[in-house]
Structures are given as C-alpha cells and as structure tokens.
Amino acid sequence: MSNGKKLTRKLKKNLPVTGPQAPTLYELMQWYCFTTNTHGCRRIVASKGRLRKWIWIGLTLTAVGLVFWQCALLLMSYYSVSVAITVTFQKLLFPAVTICNLNPYRYSAIKSHLTTLDADTEKALKDLYGFVETTIRRRREADSPEDGLYLKKMPLFNLESVNGDELVVKDITSKKRSRMRARVMHKEANSVSVGGENIVGFKLCDPQNSSDCTVFTFSSGINAIQEWYRLHYMNILATIPMAEKIAMGYSADELFVTCFFDGLSCDSRNFTLFHHSLYGNCYTFNSVERGNLLFSSMGGMEYGLKVVMYIDESEYNPYLITSAGAKILVHDQDDYPFIEDLGTDIETATETTIGMQLTESVKMSSPYSDCTIDGSDVPVNNLYNKKYTFQICLHSCFQREMIRSCGCGHYDQPLPAGEKYCNYMEFPSWIYCYFKLNKRFVQEQLGCQSTCRQSCSFKEWTLTRSLAKWPSVSSEEWMLRILTWELGNKINKNLTKHDLANLGIFYQDLNMRSISENPANSIVTLLANFGGQLGLWLSCSMVCVFEIVEIFLVDSFWVVLRQRWHKLCKWWKNRRANQAQESPNIPVPAMAGHDNPICLGDEDPPTFNTALHLPQVQNSQVPRTPPPNYNTLRIQEAFNEVDSDSEDEHL
C-alpha cells in the first residue's frame, strides 16, 4: 500500500465520528457508545482487552433483558385491579320481595281447559301402575273428553331393551311390544340401564322427518308423567288469553291474610301484580311501579315484612304441583324476578324467618374485565324490559334461537314484537324442536354463554333462613278460628294450618357491605416504575430511551438509505459507462495532405507529424527526470510509530 493511502486511512481513522451523519452503521454505533449516558455501552467500546469487552457485552445484554422482563410484568399488572371492601351503616332501602303461590291457577277455574289432558294422565297412571284416583274424578266434574288425544300426540312407553338405536318398547296404552329406531336421551343420568319396567319415557319425532326421533327416558314414572304433563300444559296455556289467566289465578286479597312492615299494618295495595308464566299471579312488595319506595328504619324482625299467606292446598293441580307452599325472591327493584331459578320455598304450617345482609358489588369494565355496564354492547336484544343481567341475556338469547329455529317462542319467556307462542295447532313440531335446541343450549353449542357477559354492578342479598312450627298446639285452635272468621267472605270452609304459611323477612342489621374494584396501578405509577427499572439496570432515564429510539430507528434508517442511494448512483454511472463503450465507432476518412505519410514523396520536406511515424531506434534509452526523494521529508518515522501503535491496539 502506498504511503499516501496509508496517510489517508490513518487520518480518517483518527478523525472524530460524525454522529448521525456517519457514513456507515458501524461508525454510527461507535459514536453512540462514546456519547451515550448508558454506562454499559460506553464500557464495551472503551474497555481494553477482549475479555473485558465480552464481559461488558454480557452484562449489558443481561440488563436489557431484565428491563424488558420487568417492564412486561409492569404492563400486565397495569390492567389488574385491587378489591376494596367497605362497610357502611345507613338507612337501607328495603328490597323488592316477589311472592308466588306454588300453584299457579285455581284448579276449579282452569279444569275446563285441562279436561282431556287430565283424563289421558289418569289413563296412563292406570295402565302403568293400576292407579285410579276416584276423588279427583269426582272433583273435576267434567264432560267425557276425547280419549287418548295427548297420548296419541306424544305416546308413553316402557323401555325394555336398548341396542344402539334399536329399541324394544311396550306401549302403555295398547300393551303392544314393538321395535323402533330412535336416539335415547336419559333425562336424569348420562347412561340408561335397562333391566326392568321402571324405565318410562315418551317418543318425539320431527313431523317433517319421521326417521328423526328421540325417546326421552326417566328412571321413575313420576318424573316421566310430570314432564309429559308439563309439556302439554304449557301448550294449552299458550292458547289462553292473558286476561283469562289472570282471572284464574289468586288475587292479592286472597293470597295475603295479614301484612305488617316496619311495625305498621299493610295490605294488598302495597303489592304489585306480576304475572309469571309458570307460577301465575305473583305479587311484588315495594315495587318501583308503586312510586314511593320503603326504607328500613332499623334492623331486626320487628322492622321487616311479616305476612301470613293463604295457600289453599285444596285447589292445587295434582299432576302439575307435588309440593305445597309459596315461593319468594328478594331482588333489586330494577331486576327481573327469575323466581323459578333463584326463589326460596316457604312451607305451610311453618313460620319462616329470613334475615338479609346487603352486598353491593361494582366491577371495573374493559380493559380490566369483560363485564358490561348496561348491556348495550352485547349483541342480544333484551326481551324483559328490565335492567340487564346475565340471566336476562341467556333467556333472551335462547328465545331468539327458539324463534329462529322453531318459528315460535317458548311460553315461559317473553316474546319479541310480532311473534307467537308455540302450540300444536300452528306449530306441530315445536316440542321436538325445543328439546333439540335445549340440548344444544345446555352443551353451550348455541353460543349464548360466550356472547352474554356479566354485569359490572349488581346487588346481592345473603339470606339466613330459620324455621319454626306454626301455629303452636296451644294457639292453633283460636288462631285458625279467628282467621276463618276474617276470611269468611272469601272462603267457604274452616281453615287448617296446612292452608297457611307465615313469612318474616328483615334486615339483620343496617350494615351495607360494598365490594369495589379499583385499578392497581395508575399511569403515573406505571411511568415511575418504568423509570426505576431503567435507572436500576441501565443507569439511564426516559431521555436515553428516546435517544435509543432516535439512533436505532431514525438515524440507522437514514444511514442505510444513504448507502443504498450511493450504490444506486454508482450502479447507474457504471451502466452509462458500459453503454458508452458498447456504442459502435464510425471511421472518419483522413484528409489528403502533408500529414499523410502515404502522400509524401521523396522530395517532400519532413514535418513534425511525419517524424512521429518514423521507426524508433532500437535499444535506445530516453533520459527521464528522477523521482523526488520522500525520505528527505522525514515523515516515514512518524508513520512507523502510528502503525506500531495501531497494531498494538488491534492486538
């Protein structure tokens, strides 16, 4: 390598790095390591010796990894919440209390609609077990119905053997054995054990496809008869007008015998009618529809609600209801009372006292949890016209799928505008469609459980229930006599203790427990934690982070872009040069004259141009000017010193 090139390289190497304007990424990174406040990067470049460099490289990379790990943990904990529980003592709003008789309609009022169904049920019981209820026959006082109408629509079977889809069954009515192909669905277990005649079920088929059938089996004839009866019962109720159903139920004056709240007397005017599809006329105490809501002034039984209810067990439907009493549900005024799912049973001839404790919960919405504030962001239409809850969403979703798949709505849920309830006359296949849809719903195949979300705020009452025999033996006679006398205008019989139920419901104390969620970290705390991690592991601040972003993203991008641009320009110049060399040379004819040696004669005088064409003398050396002696400038020794130093540094 010539001395000039050595000088250029050494001077260029010892010149300061030009920072963001560096021509290469190596020079840019070298300048950053010398000028940054991050100590690890500076030590990598400034350290003498290869071992120290590798040690600092390892320490710096470890610190960077720890910073990323800790910052990732901080980001994940940013969306966590902390739960705060507070207990406050204040005057509490008394909740809404919905009370229903377990018997939805007076049997004497609805028997005209159930004549045929009851006759088929008695026939099935007689054929199965030889049972005849003569008292029920006398009480019904109905005309002779059409025999076997509902048994023909949905026949009952004794299941004798099962071999895959091959079934051997015995018809209850005709006593004939037959083979059929159908799926078996056991309503009380995952498997069917066939070894006797206690396996009772009914067969459902799709009217549009006779080969699509399912036999629903039960381990007890009681469960089979009740399920079979309930399906036909709901089909009949779907055809009865609402005004007639309300008239067949119990009025508030008939249901409530005595009433006290907060030490003061109350009556049926304090209750609001709520018609339930399964329990008939229910009544809500302290409902929002009545306007002025009631508060509990103190805790204890004397300051709660106390009612005595007339159950009227003699009017119970023997096939629909097998237990006697009432059902109650404590809920918020804005909530829909799902009494069939969450209700508490009240026994007859018993005093039931229920102590309440209020808990109010508030959860954080997105991004902290998947709950919804008011249900407006859930793609399910609320059919209940009440405050959004998870149960409302599930029932509304199922009813929507029921209408879409079966063409009609189930009787125990509200209907969208313009739709109809399912019944045999208009929708003959609705029962089979309902069972198939309900199976998919239970197995979470309809998507309702994944679509619906929990509510972010809700109230919950923890109930403590206690029972006592009521009335006592010593007080039974006079109490029942007085109550019979007071109800003389409403009933025409002497009351027994099994016709009455006593309920007391109250706040145990006025302490309200609030459970609220708050963000575990604020944005200020998050940034402070980020700064602490950066200072702990890399000894830098957020300004250093911005500097790193600028160097490794912005400046590096421009360096690479400049290098690409220079390569592109160089390639373009080389291409133009190659094109110029490949272009053809067009010969130009020479002009005749004295410069043309061909035209010269022997007598023409020689010229300078002709002298250039003369042959040169062999073995002749033309003296030339000797090159300058650079050693006289005395620079070589300095270069030798610089070279030795650089070689030492490389070593």
Image (cartoon, helix red, strand yellow):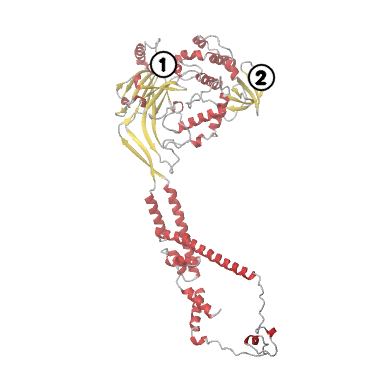
Q: How many marks?
A: 2
Is residue 618 visible from the viewing direction of this image? no
Residue 392 shown left or right of residue 152 in the figure: left
- Rounded to the nearest whole Å, what is the CA distance between mark 2 and mark 1? 45 Å
Is residue 139 visible from the viewing direction of this image? yes
CA neighbours of label 2 inside 10 A, class few (<14), some (14 to 19), many (20+) = some
Q: Quadrant of the N terminus?
A: bottom right
x then y, percent, for residue 93 = 33, 30
Secondary structure beneath disc 1? helix
x then y, percent, for residue 408 = 53, 25
Instruction: Kindly identify which residue carries mark 2.
Output: 177
Q: Which of 624 and 250 is in front in this view?
A: 624
Which three-letter amino acid code belongs to the residue tagged 2? Arg
Secondary structure beneath disc 2? strand
Which three-letter amino acid code belongs to the residue tagged 1? Asp
x then y, percent, for residue 312 = 42, 15
Compared to residue 582, the image places residue 554 above or below, namely above
Marking on residue 499: 1
Where, by quadrant of the figure, is residue 355 drawn? top left
